Image (tube, rainbow, N blue to C red):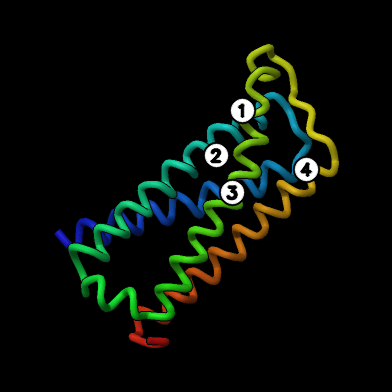
Amino acid sequence: MSTLFAFLHHLCAFTLVSAVAIEFVLIRQELTLSSARRLQVTDMVLGIAAGALLFVGLVRVFFLEKGPDYYWHSHAFLTKFSLFVVIALVSIIPTLEFLSWRKAIGAGQVPVIDAKKRKLVTAVIHGELLGIVIILLCAAIMARGGWV
């Protein structure tokens, strides 16, 4: 069971990273009807992957692996988990923007995003990528039993 959940955890994590990378590429290009649709779908995949990652990760913490006492006393885990929550909350900014495009896309029109909003969404996606790198560092530290 532990191996299955480890696999699912990694699958969700790689899916999440892939979705953020796709958003990173798409938001930097000229916005078209096609790329706007792709951003919406990619963001939905990102949200599903994040939710599944959280669920699977918490199952691993509470029912598998080393148990909750180990994880809740690990600074590396607490940093990793806190950063995940912060990234999830900040990622609401691009999600709300992409959702606001539904009407325009439904009408077959390219959504309009002003330069200030585009810069904010792009900065959030860059921040998500940076946060993911730090989360990976924390995971490596945890795997080596460090920063307890």
- Badge 3 marks a residue whose secondary structure is loop
Residue drawn at (42%, 41%), measured in percent from left and top? 48
The quadrant in which residue 86 appears is: bottom right
Q: Nearer the viewer, residue 29 or 97?
A: 97
Q: Could you say which is closer to the camera, residue 82 or residue 136?
A: 82
Residue 67 on image: x %, y %: 21, 72
What amino acid type should be assigned to the residue bearing mark 4?
Arg
Q: Quadrant of residue 140?
A: bottom left
Judging by the rendered image, the residue that carries numbered circle 2 is 43
The amino acid on which the numbered mark 1 sits, given as a three-letter code, is: Arg
The answer to whether residue 119 is above or below residue 147 is above
Q: CA distance from mark 3 to mark 1?
A: 18 Å
Quadrant in which the C terminus appears: bottom left
Earlier along the polypeptide chain: callout 2 or callout 4? 2
Instruction: Give 100 or 29, whichever is nearer the viewer.
Output: 100
Is label 2 in contact with label 3 (beta carbons under 8 Å)? no
Q: CA distance from mark 2 to mark 1?
A: 10 Å
Of callouts 4 and 3, which one flags the residue occurring earlier in the amino acid sequence?
3
The residue singled out by tag 3 in the image is: 91
Closest to the camera, between mark 2 and mark 1, is: 2
Q: Is residue 34 above or below residue 78?
A: above
Q: Position of residue 99 (x, y in %)?
A: 61, 30
Q: Are marks 3 and 1 in contact (CB under 8 Å)?
A: no
Query: Tag 2: Cα neighbours inside 10 Å, few (<14), some, or many (≥20)?
Result: many
The x, y position of residue 11, in whole percent, is: 35, 53
Q: Earlier in the sequence, mark 2 or mark 3?
A: 2
Badge 4 is on which residue? 118
Crowd class of label 4 (few under 14; some 14 to 19; many from 20; radius 10 Å) = some
Which amino acid, mark 3?
Answer: Ser
Residue at horizontal 42 percent and vertical 87 percent from the top = 147
Residue 36 as seen in the image, left or right of residue 84 = right
* Residue at mark 1: 37
